[in-house]
Amino acid sequence: MGSKKKIRVLATKPGLDGHDRGIKVVASALMDAGMEVIYTGFRQTPLQVVEAAIQEDVDVIAMSSLSGAHDYLFPKVMELLKERGADDILVIGGGIIPDEDIPALKACGISEIFGPGTNTQDVIKYIKENVKR
């Protein structure tokens, strides 16, 4: 029996964004790749995201934003993770995020940003290579 724990991923849509097709596609691909995915649905506050991540003991938080509020929401999640001592969680973002916003998001601790049309295999590979065990 393999004692390798499945990678646990919290898939979430912080903010007032009502479009969840993208995150559902990613969540489903991660499950197909053998990961455990907890999907919080949308309209999550940064605090709800962080509390769910800690409660569920996840390895990865995958956030999606199409509403343009990523420049507030993503850094806020990182700030709360640090406050809770949970900043060892790998955090990735996706959605419609302008290229010029990416450096600031990475500077606050978001590990990688995946734009529209990203192959889900690339996301899976990235998580497997970068998750902190």
Image (tube, rainbow, N blue to C red):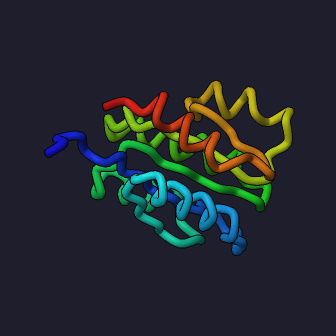
Q: Which is more toward the observer, 122 or 77?
A: 122
Location of residue 12 in the rendering, given as x and y in whole percent from the top left corner: 54, 61
At 56% across and 30% down in the image, what residue appears? 109
Image position of 117 with respect to 101: above or below: below
Image quarter of the N terminus: top left
Residue closest to the far front: 1
Residue displayed at 85% across by 42% down: 98
108 shown above or below 69: above
The C terminus sits in image quarter: top left
Query: Where in the figure is residue 96, as x and y percent of width and height?
Result: 80, 52
**Which residue is depicted at the point 28% across and 57% down?**
55
**84 to the left or right of 39:** left
- 58 or 73, which is in the foreground? 58
117 vs 50, nearest the viewer = 117
Residue found 60% across the figure and 40% down from its top? 75
Residue 65 image position (x, y, % from top left)? 70, 56
**Left-right relation of 92 to 115:** left
Residue 9 relative to residue 112: left or right: left
Q: Is residue 106 visible?
A: yes
